[in-house]
Every structure is written in structure tokens, then in C-alpha cells.
Amino acid sequence: MTIVEISLVKELLISKTEDIEKRTLHVLAQLSDEEVNYRYNEMSNSIANLVVHISGNIDERIRSGICGREVIRDRDAEFETLYRTKDELIELTNQSYRDVKETIQQMSEEDFMKTQQIRNREHINLDVLLKCVTHFSEHLGQMLYLAKMLKDQNFVTASIPKRK
């Protein structure tokens, strides 16, 4: 990759991360502590579960896999019944995405091409980051859907509003 290409990759990854972060915070801002912890049933996730899970994914794939920090993750616990306040989730969201953006900004071409093991397969870090951003976006969609169900007519979209 050229310097221009690396710059573009960083810009695109950071831009997408910022968009996901902004929209996640928009959802959280509209909800109460009870609403962020609402689970439709035992097989469903709350918005709190999803935010905690995204942070766990960032721990494993980025903080540990790319940055080399020691991280202990209990993925199954991320999906158990848990309770987090809205403010805790906002702070976790801010810190998680700040770490992602700072990591991407500091990466060199060599860093993007380094590999890490995920489920017994080797992946280059650029692919890991692309998969992470896709993963975050999938869970953002779940959060938006849950928030829309919970708020009904009071939901304020993070996108272009539907014409009435």
C-alpha cells in the first residue's frame, strides 16, 4: 500500500467507527436505565448486553490482538442477564471507540499486515478491523431496532426520518 492508500484506509475506518459511535450514543441518550437493560426474553440481548459485547470484542481483537495488551474476556458473560446504567454504557461506548480510533490512527502499513489468530485461523489486522466495524454495525442495527420498539412514536431517528 502507498502512503495515500494507508491514509485512506485509516480515514475510512475511523469515519465508519465515528458514525457507529455517534449513532450508538444517540440511541443511549433516548433511553432510561431500565430500557437499556430490557430483554424481550432469555434468548434475546438487551442494549446493555450489546454494548458490553462490543467492548469485549474490542478487548479481544484490538486491545489484545492488535495492541498486544493482556486482556481477559468472558464472552459468555456478555450475553447473560446483566445490569448497567445508561451512564456506564455511555462511558464504555466512548472509551471503546476512542481506543479503536486511536489504534487505527497509530497503525503503520506493517501493523495492518501483521496477523493474529482468531478461531484457529490467521487474519491480517486490516481484515480484523473490517470485520470488527461490520460486527459493530450489525449490533448497532439491533440497538436501533430495540430502541425504536421501546420508544415507539417517541423514538428520534439517527437517520433520515420517515415522511408522515
Image (cartoon, rainbow, N blue to C red):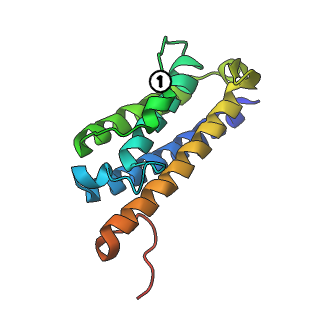
The residue depicted at 59 percent of the width and 19 percent of the height is 65
Q: Quadrant of the N terminus?
A: top right
- 134 in relation to 150, above or below: above
Q: Residue furthest bottom?
A: 164
| 26 to the left or right of 62 | left
Residue 99 horizontal/vertical position (percent) = 44, 28
Looking at the image, which is closer to me, 115 or 75?
75
Amino acid tagged 1: Asp
| 17 to the left or right of 152 | right
Residue 139 horizontal/vertical position (percent) = 51, 49
Looking at the image, which is closer to me, 138 or 99?
138
The residue depicted at 74 percent of the width and 25 percent of the height is 123
Q: Quadrant of residue 68?
A: top right
Q: Quadrant of residue 155?
A: bottom left
- 43 in relation to 132, above or below: below
Residue 76 horizontal/vertical position (percent) = 49, 31
Q: Quadrant of residue 49?
A: top left
Report the residue marked by disc 1: 74
Q: Find numbered disc 1 in the image and state the secondary structure of the residue it sits on.
A: loop
Q: Quadrant of the C terminus?
A: bottom left
Looking at the image, which is closer to me, 22 or 71?
71
The residue depicted at 48 percent of the width and 49 percent of the height is 43
